[in-house]
Image (tube, rainbow, N blue to C red):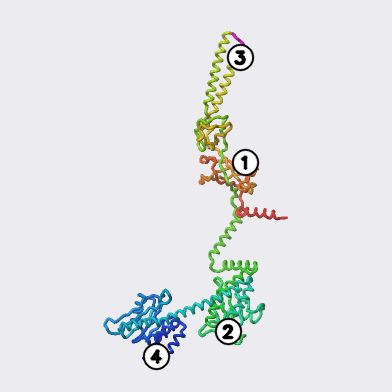
Amino acid sequence: MSNGVAADKGGDAAVNDERPLVLEPALWQRLQAAATFEAAAAAWLPLQTQSLRNAQSGLVLAGDAAAALTPLAVWPAGTRDDLAAAARLAVTERHPIVQEPKSGEGAALIAVPLTEGEGGELFGCVAFRLATRDRDGLRAAIRQVQWGAAWLAAKRGLAAGRDERRQLARTRATLDLLAGALEQERFKAACMAVATDLAIAFHCTRAAVGFSQAGRTRVAAISHTAQFERSMNLVRKLGACMDEALDQRSLVLFPAPSGDGTVTRAHADLARLRHDGRVLTVPFMAGDHFAGAFTLERTGEEPFDEETIAIIAAAAAAIGPVLDEKRQNDRWLAAKAWEACATLVRRVVGPHHATLKLSLAAAAIAGLALATVKADYRVTADARVEGLVRRAIVAPYDGYLKVAEHRAGDTVRKGDLLAALEDRDLVLERLRWVTERQQRRFEYDKALATRQPATINVVRSQIEQAEAQINLVDEQLSRLKFYAPFDGLIVSGDLSQAIGGAISRGQVLFEVAPLDDYRVVITVDERFIADLREGQTGQMLAGALPDTPYPIVVQTITPVAEARNGRNMFRVEGRVTAAATRLRPGMEGIAKVEVDRRLLAWTWARPILDWLRLAVWHWMP
C-alpha cells in the first residue's frame, strides 16, 4: 500500500508524488514545522485520512468560491474529479454534505467547507471518499474532519500573521530610517544620518549613499565617517559599485545567486577589501529617473538573506526621493538656475517635447513681431454721449403744476407743449384790471364831457396804470406754458407724478438736447493725458450700439483733474463728426483716440516701464 503527499512550490497547485507510506510521527513533525498553508495541507491530509475509518482518498482545495477552488493536496496521488465536484457543492451551500452512490453500492463522499474567524470566512474545502454507507459513521466522520480542520485554519492564520509581521517589520524599518532623514535640515547631514542608520539597523560594516551627476555617481556620505576625500580608493570603489547598479537598472548582490546574470565586477573589487565580504547595492528612483544608490557591506560570515534585501529595497525606495529632494533644495541658486536652463535646452534640442518646441517657436515669432511691427497707438478711455446744446426749461416764478405733456426720454418737436402751470389766479387778476380800466374809461368820458381838466389827467393816469397791469398779467400768463425750443430729446425732467404740486421759482423743469448734434465726454487717465492734442481723431463705440463705431474729433482738453476710484482723471471733450441718428444723450461706451504709430512692444510694455521709472525715481537718493 502506498500514499502520495502533494506539496506546492511557488504558489502553484500541489504536484503529487508517490512514495512509501510516511510514518505518522514524521507527518506530525512536518505539520507542526510547516511554514506555509500549502505545506500544512500536504502533511495534514494523510494524517486526517488515516484517522478516518474506511477512508479511501482525500482532497484539499483552497479558494473563497466554488469557481475559484484549486487543489492543494491529494491522497493518494491522482485526480479526483468526483471529490472536487462534491467540494464545490459544499462550498456553494456553505455546509457539510454527504453524497451516497445511486446504485446502492460503492463508496460515499463527504465534503466540509473550511472557515475561520467569527464571520465564518470561507478559505477552502476538504473532501473524502469513505467505503461505507452507514449514516452514523458518516456523521462521525464529518465531525472528526471538522475537528481536524482546525489545524488548517490555525496554520493559515499563522502564515498570514507571519506575512503581516514581515510587512510590519519592513514598514517600521523604513519609517525609522525616514524619520532620521527628515530630522536633518541639511542634505549632507541627512545623508550621513541615513548611511549610519542603515549600517546599524542591518548590521553592516559599512553603508554609503551616492547620487548620479553628469553620468557618474558621487558618494555623498559613508557611515561612521564625517569627512572623506573623493580621491580615496574606497570612495572610488563605492562609486564604481553604484555606477554598476545604476547602469544595469537593478539591484546588485555579491556574491550573486546562482543563475543571476547581473555584472558584479566592481562589487567583487570592493568585496576583496574585506577579504571575501558581502556587498549589496540598491538603486533608487526620484520621479522618472534613477537618482542614486545605497551600497551596504557585510562580512563573509553574515550574508544578506532575501528578507533583509527586501526590507533594504523598500527602505531605499522611500528614503531615496526624500534625500534627492533635500539635495535639490540645498544647492546654490545659481546651480538651480543653471540646471533649469540646461534641462530646458535639452528639451528644446533633444527628441520629444513637441509642444514645448512649438510654444517656444511661437513665442520667438511673437517677440520678433512685437519688436519690429508698428501699429496704431491709441488712447482708450471711458466715454459718455451728451448733446452739443443742452437747453434748460426753468420755472419763472412760484406756482402749481397744471399739466405735464412730456417727460425725460420723449422726442419733441419745436413748439410742442411740455408743461403748464395753474393760471386761475392770474386770469382773475387780469379780469379785475380789465374791469378797473373800463371803470376809469367811463370816468374819463364823464370828466371830458364836464370839462374837468384836473380829473381828466388823473383818470388818464389810472387808465394807463390799469393797462400796464393788464400787460403784466398777460406776460405772466404767457410764461405759464413751457414749449420745446427746438427739435430734440428731453434728457431730464419727469413731472408726470407732480400734477398739482408746487413749483418754485428757478426750478429746472426739463433739459432738452438736439437729436442731430452730439459731443462725447472722454474720461482720460492722467498717465495718458500728455499724449492727447486738440484736433486728434478717433472712434467711439456705445455700449447700446456695439455694432456701429462713430468717428469723433477732440475739441477741448480740460486742464483740471478729478479724483475717481482713487485715480486722477481728466475731462476731454470731442464731437461726433458723422450722422448719429441712433445715438442718444446719456449713452456710455469706450472711446479710442488715435495718437500715432508705434512698436507693439512699446505699446504693451509702456505701463510696466512707467511704473519702473516711478519706482526707481522714488528710491533714488
Mark 3, secondary structure of its residue: helix
User: Viewer-nearest of labels 2 and 1?
Assistant: 2
Mark 4, secondary structure of its residue: loop
Distance, label 4 to label 3, CA atoms, is: 168 Å
First in residue order: circle 1 vs circle 3: 3
Q: Which residue is mark 3?
A: 458
Q: Is residue 517 above or below residue 339?
A: above
Distance, label 1 to label 3, CA atoms, is: 62 Å
Answer whether residue 135 is magenta in the image: no
Q: Which residue is mark 2?
A: 278
Q: Which residue is mark 4?
A: 21
First in residue order: circle 1 vs circle 4: 4
- For the residues labelled 2 and 4, say whether their Cβ atoms are less than 8 Å apart: no
User: Viewer-nearest of labels 1 and 4?
Assistant: 4
What residue type is disc 4 on?
A: Leu
Boundaries of the magenta span: 451-455
Q: Is residue 347 above or below residue 99?
A: above
Measured as percent of width and height from the top left, residue 537 is found at 59, 44
Instruction: Report the disc number at residue 556.
Output: 1
First in residue order: circle 4 vs circle 3: 4
What residue type is disc 3 on?
A: Val
What residue type is disc 2 on?
A: Arg
Mark 2, secondary structure of its residue: strand
Quadrant in the rendering for residue 615: bottom right
Check disc 4: other Cα within 10 Å, few if <14, some if 14-19, many if 20+. Answer: few
